[in-house]
Image: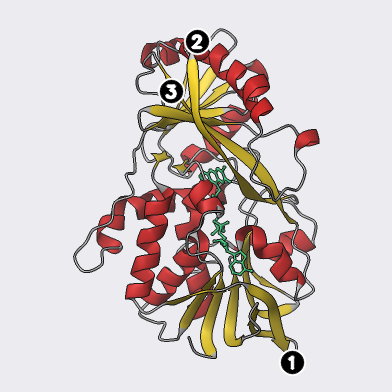
């Protein structure tokens, strides 16, 4: 490690490593690049604790576009992320998402469907009878419609994806150091580098804040308040004696989700707003399974009345409480620092689009492939939320 780099990225999980990869792979970037990551095992990163799924079914066009690119990126990763002839594979399974709606939720489902189709998402609205034809195990009694992704949506192994991106970035010249960035440094009104917790200072032309749930503390060290809070989300892995063939990632009208995982299934649900404090612990919320999630799943898919939970874990969304969307790019009062924070539970699939966008901001000073300016700080500072309503 040197004392000075053109770009220093704090946080080397999905977003930080994607930024490192897209910078290192850009023929117009010939600078030096350091990723500061406090934990090379990524045991507590949202990236590796996530449900690792990709959907195109969002309510805002920008989110759909980023996720469409996520699909494209993952489909091509065997070639683009190959190192020394080894083609990585994250096991992407295009099983689709199925969003279910009761009469109350129908207008929103239809409105979202129109936005998704306009953006080129391969989604279709189904009647209850059509759903039963495809998914005979489904209880459609209270449903009026469902929205199914026919291609491009699905799930993968997040750790394999991260490892492949990181490995490729390193092969192209990015350096990684295992250390915690304790503060941003500034000089003449601009961010000039980072201080590590062993006291070392690294100078940087540009710093990227890709620290996930560590992002708000890092921003605060430069006097900037990010509206990003860590919110615990639990994932439950279970077996079921009965088969549930062709189960997509199903979203119940109450927000519970379930999808196949290996020979079993994983499921989760947001706690209700009154029971969703800022959190840093990794304790599994078992009453959530017992009292809310399992009853929902067993009602929706009667085969799930007899299941056995094998494992469960907790991770944290970096939740942007302002509007549940990414905050991307520079803050007007803080030159030399780019943000990519507040991904609110959908950041794994969007990390390639975000990494590419950050690289373009650094190399060209503007977005080139996908205009993501609606995700800038401006909306936050002007109090104009870009609300994403499909937060799972
Ligand atoms: C339970 C759960 C389910 C999810 N399911 C999905 C899903 O199905 N699909 C999807 O797209 N997304 C999902 N997400 C969200 C997704 O995981 C995140 O949005 C995404 O991984 C964020 O990536 P990141 O790189 O910004 O943050 P993280 O993965 O949290 O990484 C941040 C990194 O920064 C490091 N760091 C933090 N502070 C410092 C510091 N000061 N110095 C050095 N290093 C630091 C951390 O060690 C960490 O490695 C889920 C998240 C959770 C918790």
The residue closer to the viewer here, 260 or 24, is 260
Q: Disc 2 or 3, which lies upstream in sequence?
A: 3
Task: Name the mark on residue 188.
Answer: 1
| Viewer-nearest of discs 3 and 1 | 3
- Horizontally, residue 110 falls left or right of residue 380, namely left
Q: Can residue 249 be seen in this view?
A: no
The residue closer to the viewer here, 115 or 281, is 281
Residue 106: which quarter of the image?
top right
Q: Is mark 3 on a helix, strand or loop?
A: strand
Percent x, y of residue 34: 49, 79
| Dot 1 alpha-carbon crowd within 10 angstroms: few under 14, some 14 to 19, many 20 or more | few
Percent x, y of residue 325: 65, 51
Instruction: For the residues labelled 2 and 1, say whether their Cβ atoms are less than 8 Å apart.
Output: no
| Dot 3 alpha-carbon crowd within 10 angstroms: few under 14, some 14 to 19, many 20 or more | many
Specify whether tag 2 is near ligand 1 (CB below 8 Å). Answer: no
**What color scheme is it?**
secondary structure
Percent x, y of residue 41: 47, 60
Q: Residue at x 38, y 11 (%)?
A: 133
Percent x, y of residue 98: 48, 27
| Viewer-nearest of discs 2 and 3 | 3
- Horizontally, residue 104 falls left or right of residue 28, namely right
Q: Disc 3 or 1, which lies upstream in sequence?
A: 1
- Horizontally, residue 284 falls left or right of residue 300, namely right
| Viewer-nearest of discs 2 and 1 | 2
Q: Can residue 286 be seen in this view?
A: yes
Q: Vertically, is 189 above or below 143?
A: below
The residue that mark 3 highlights is 239
The residue closer to the viewer here, 48 or 375, is 48
Real-space Cα distance between discs 2 and 3?
A: 14 Å
The residue that mark 2 highlights is 302
């Amino acid at each position: 490690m040197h004392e000075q780099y053109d770009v220093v990225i704090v946080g080397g999980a999905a977003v930080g490593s994607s930024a490192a990869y897209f910078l290192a792979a850009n023929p117009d970037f010939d600078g030096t690049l350091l990723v500061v990551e406090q934990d090379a095992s990524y045991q507590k990163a949202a990236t590796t604790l996530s449900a690792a799924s990709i959907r195109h079914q969002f309510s805002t066009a920008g989110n759909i576009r980023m996720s469409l690119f996520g699909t494209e990126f993952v489909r091509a990763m065997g070639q683009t992320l190959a190192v020394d002839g080894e083609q990585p594979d994250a096991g992407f399974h295009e099983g689709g998402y199925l969003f279910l709606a009761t009469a109350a939720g129908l207008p929103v489902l239809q409105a979202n469907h129109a936005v998704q189709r306009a953006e080129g998402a391969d989604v279709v609205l189904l009647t209850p009878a059509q759903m039963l034809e495809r998914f005979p195990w489904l209880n459609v009694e209270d449903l009026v419609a469902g929205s199914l992704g026919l291609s491009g949506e699905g799930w993968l192994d997040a750790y394999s994806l991260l490892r492949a991106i990181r490995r490729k970035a390193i092969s192209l010249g990015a350096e990684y150091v295992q250390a915690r960035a304790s503060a941003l440094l500034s000089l003449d009104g601009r961010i000039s580098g980072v201080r590590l917790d062993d006291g070392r200072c690294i100078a940087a032309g540009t710093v990227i804040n890709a620290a996930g749930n560590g992002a708000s503390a890092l921003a605060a060290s430069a006097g900037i308040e990010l509206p990003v809070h860590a919110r615990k989300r639990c994932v439950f892995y279970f077996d079921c004696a009965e088969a549930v063939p062709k189960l997509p990632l199903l979203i119940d009208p109450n927000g519970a989700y379930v999808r196949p995982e290996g020979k079993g299934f994983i499921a989760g649900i947001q706690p209700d707003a009154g029971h969703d404090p800022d959190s840093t612990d990794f304790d599994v919320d078992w009453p959530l399974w017992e009292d809310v999630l399992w009853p929902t799943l067993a009602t929706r898919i009667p085969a799930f009345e007899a299941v056995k939970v094998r494992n469960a874990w907790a991770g944290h969304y970096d939740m942007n409480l302002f509007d549940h969307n990414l905050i991307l790019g520079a803050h007007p009062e803080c030159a030399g620092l780019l943000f990519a924070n507040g991904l609110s539970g959908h950041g794994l699939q969007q990390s390639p689009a975000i990494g590419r966008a950050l690289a373009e901001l650094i190399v060209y000073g503007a977005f080139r492939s996908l205009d993501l300016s609606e995700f800038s700080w401006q909306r936050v500072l002007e109090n104009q939320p870009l609300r994403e309503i499909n937060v799972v």
